[in-house]
Image (cartoon, rainbow, N blue to C red):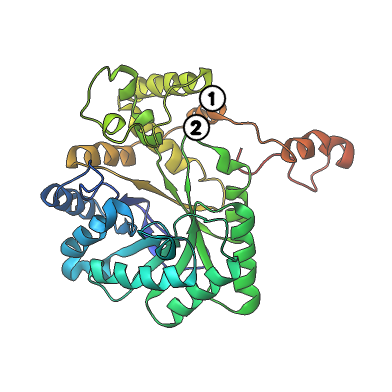
Amino acid sequence: MNYKIFGSKTGLRVSELALGTGTFGTRWGYGSELAEARNVFSRYLEAGGNFIDTADGYQLGESEEILGELIGDRRDELVLASKYSMGGKSLSTSGNSRKTMVRAVEASLKRLKTDRLDLYWAHLSDGQMPIEEIVRAFDDLVRDGKILYAGFSNFPAWRVATASLLADLRGWSPVAGIQIEYNLIERTADRELLPMAEALGLGVTFWSPLAGGSLTGKYRSAGNDKNNRQAAWNGFLLKGETGERETAILDALEALAKEYEVTVLAVALAWIRQKHDQSTLSTVTIIGPRTTAQLDDNLTSLNLTLTQEHIQKLNGVSAISLGSPHEIIANSSQSLFGANSNLVTLTHPVA
């Protein structure tokens, strides 16, 4: 396991794979009992991992409760992150408000049996709360010592950029990073979110790197198997093989898996781990194994280094249209600056 500093605005030393604990617990009807969660947690730490990701809404709070039992005296060894916004049960206890944030962080600290969180995310934009309120409330929690850093999960780029600028101009605790869905099938973050994060020095955590299991290849022949998340969660987060692009991605993954003599998922995880090595982005991949067998499958990806040729092949089959204005800028660059100009970067920084 390798380690990195999470973005340019924190001193957090984090492992390149974070342990997502959305499957710790069974209140959603699918997940790990305490004994299995303990095995997964211990095995992840043995492999060198130190970055734990949870949320107040995961398994209706049970994920945090289980982690509170498992962490024990290892708290200082870990980078512990949680989220708020989706853990409330009523209109006044959910969303992004200061009121919700204060209530949620106190409840999370109690469930996790700790006095502070290393990283605290606003889980999902409610589309209503002023960004000033969220960032100012984060700053209060930092000053109170209840959180060390804060960031935004599943927020549009313009709101995160505004938050980062406000924090910097007003001397509030800086926005540390973003958490986004990203994988070979879901690459829309290439348009705005990733260029923004690189420009602002934000750390990035990728959730659903296997597209809800689609990039394991197993759903190509899942048949009537009901003992899987596709059945248990009604296909939640499962992208599926819905068109020619997805078929081309899975075909390419299977071909490379055969060439390297590894699993399909190992190739998919190796790609996302190496995708931005040539940029200044600081990225972490969140894996969400339910069992130790799934965790071990995920960890095998750490032993795989793809060639640049193979990374480019996967980049190509998974590429998306960047849309306007990015394509207009690219198509107009020659006439604006001349064919031999080297004054500007003419290609998208993460394409």
Q: Residue furthest bottom?
A: 144
Q: Residue furthest left?
A: 35
Q: Is residue 293 above or below residue 172?
A: above
Which amino acid type is marked by label 2? Ile
Which amino acid type is marked by label 1? Val
What x and y, as percent, mark residue 64? 26, 60
Q: Is residue 247 above or below residue 350?
A: above
What x and y, as percent, mark residue 298? 29, 39
What x and y, as percent, mark residue 306? 43, 33
Q: Quadrant of the rendered structure where residue 349 is?
A: top right
Quadrant where the C terminus is found in the figure: top right
Residue sitting at 29 percent across and 59 percent down? 50
Residue sitting at 45 percent across and 40 percent down? 272
Question: Which element is circle 1 on?
Answer: helix
The numbered mark, 1 or 2, whose residue comes first in the sequence reads: 2
Q: Is residue 76 above or below residue 233?
A: below
Question: Callout 2: few (<14), some (14-19), or many (20+) C-alpha neighbours within 10 Å?
Answer: some
Q: Which residue is mark 1?
A: 317
Q: Quadrant of the rendered structure where residue 132 is?
A: bottom right
Q: Is residue 70 above or below residue 26?
A: below
Residue sitting at 37 percent across and 76 percent down? 146
Q: Which residue is mark 2?
A: 311
What x and y, as percent, mark residue 22? 30, 49
Asked whether 304 or 314 is in front, the reply is: 314
Question: Which element is circle 2 on?
Answer: helix
Q: Is residue 97 left or right of residue 298?
A: right
So how many labels did they put on this image? Answer: 2
Question: Callout 1: few (<14), some (14-19), or many (20+) C-alpha neighbours within 10 Å?
Answer: some
Q: Residue furthest front?
A: 91
Which of the labelled discs sits on residue 258, or is there none? Answer: none
**Discs 1/2, front:** 1
The CA span between labels 1 and 2 is 10 Å
